[in-house]
Image (spheres, grey):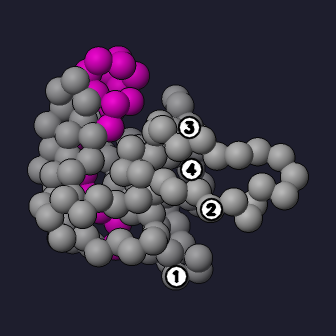
Amino acid sequence: MGKWLKVNGEAIYGTRYWKIFGEGPTVVPEGHFTDTYDKHFTSEDIRFTSKSNHIYATVLHWPEEGEIHIKALGNDMKLLKSTIRDIEILGTDLHPAFARNKELDISCGRGVIEAGDMPVVLKITVE
């Protein structure tokens, strides 16, 4: 966890929650003794934080094909009224291609990111 925070800490420290906490199909059980349950997150499970003109989208399971689709940042949900200027992947020099349509569609290419079991953070710069 410490190694992950060294790379992605800016998405955690000094941030605030964004308009919604996240999106995705995985239901996380609540209550006593549920911390041992194995959670199988998908590439649709994304959590959001923000700081100044950045939104951090933490993708809980990076897909092999390198394609991410974020509903909350697309044009249909109308949650983001700003223009997206850039997207970068924390811990890399990558600035993936993106298009803001019905959803925010992000493409890195197959096998570009080797995330393993750790979440990947997208730093989204808005105007």
Q: Which residue is mark 4?
A: 15
Specify whether residue 18 is in view. Answer: no
Q: CA distance from mark 1 to mark 3?
A: 24 Å
Q: Quadrant of the C terminus?
A: top left
2 or 3: mark nearer the eye: 2
Q: Relative to the observer, which residue lies in front, 82 or 78? A: 78
Q: Secondary structure at mark 4?
A: loop
Which residues make up the magenta segment?
70-91
Q: Tell me the crowding category of disc 1: few under 14, some 14 to 19, or many 20 or more residues within 10 angstroms, Cα based.
A: few
Q: Amino acid at mark 4?
A: Thr
**Residue extending farthest bottom:** 3
Q: Which mark is residue 38?
A: 2
Q: Which residue is mark 3?
A: 21
Is-magenta flag for residue 80?
Answer: yes
1 or 4: mark nearer the eye: 1
Q: CA distance from mark 1 to mark 4?
A: 19 Å
Q: Main secondary structure of the magenta part?
A: loop
Q: Secondary structure at mark 1?
A: helix
Could you tell me if the residues under marks 1 and 4 are in contact, i.e. CB atoms within 8 Å?
Answer: no
Q: CA distance from mark 1 to mark 2?
A: 22 Å
